[in-house]
Amino acid sequence: MSEICLKALSWNLHAMTWPLSKDPGGRMDRVSAKVRELSPDVALFQEVWFGSQVDRLTLALQPDWIPICIKRRGVGPRGGLLAFVRASAGWRVRAAPKFHPFAASAPMWKVWEGDGLGGKGILTMDLERGEQRICALNTHLQAQYRGIDYAAVREAQLIELREIVSHLHTSLPAIVAGDLNTNSRESLYSHVAALGTDLTAEARELCNCGTTTDPFDGRPEWIDYIVAANSHAWTASANLEIIANQRADFPYSDHSGLFCTLTLARRH
């Protein structure tokens, strides 16, 4: 196994009924149609909080894509993290997926923020197609709010994420994707860069845009990433497409999606 080609999609769907979407079901339908159009090998979604939304996406994407998540009893996926693996292209999950909850978190009593109650963390999957194997990590970090940026919490979560990556099988390539809630202009971005090769960097510099807008001042912010880890053993080249979103439900989520076609080659 000297080279792997993978099409990966990462997207925060913010699948809540309030305040961002008056029609979360319609949002799931539009996202499903886009997934079928792009045909990713693996789709990594954040903020899919309810079982009904998992069911709606699954119904629209089966049998070509198989859903992967760790469910909470009576609710939806743990951490709001949901993945789909393209079985029709020969990909499968080699072993049971794992969920790692972040030790660092905002207080649960701040129910109006939701992050503490959400139980955010990291969903890890070992994917396989024939002789090709790759590890995919889907994650969503603590959000920032007016008057508090939770920098200490986000830094602790980024360090946890890096520790999880460091314990992966060193001979396998890996991708880390999700909403890291950390702008590339922040000093904390150094922890993102330390994970491996940031596959969004070139597109970010060229477009001078963001993956979402700050809800308070309307400034664009780039807070979503796809990173190729284990870069000491594998090189990564990628073509990144931004699934542009103008505002909530126009046409999709409140975040733009990231669709990456990447080639991973073993270093000699």
Image (cartoon, grey):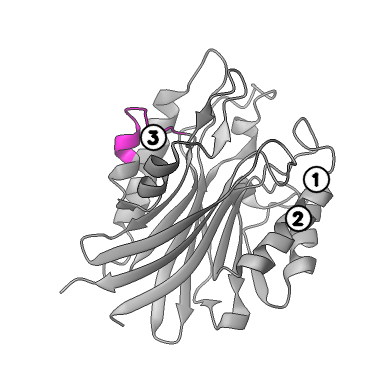
Magenta part, dominant SS: loop
Q: Residue at x 38, y 34 (%)?
A: 184
In magenta, the rendered stretch is 182-191
Residue 172 appearing in the image:
no
Q: Residue at x 40, y 66 (%)?
A: 262
Q: Residues within 10 Å of mark 1 (few under 14, many from 20)?
A: many
* Amino acid type at image mark 1: Pro
Who is closer to the viewer here, 67 or 28? 28
Q: Residue at x 74, y 66 (%)?
A: 58
Distance from label 3 to label 1 (Cα)? 29 Å
Q: Position of residue 27 (x, y in %)?
A: 77, 49
Q: Secondary structure at mark 3?
A: loop
Is 50 colored magenta in this rendering? no
Q: Residue under circle 1?
A: 24
* Amino acid type at image mark 3: Ser
Distance from label 3 to label 2 (Cα)? 28 Å
Q: Is residue 117 left or right of residue 185?
A: right
Distance from label 2 to label 1 (Cα)? 10 Å
Residue 131 appearing in the image:
yes
Q: Residue at x 50, y 36 (%)?
A: 210
Is 185 colored magenta in this rendering? yes
Q: Residue under circle 2?
A: 30
Quadrant, the C terminus: bottom left
Q: Position of residue 261 (x, y in %)?
A: 45, 65
Residue 194 sits in quarter: top left
Q: Residue under circle 3?
A: 184
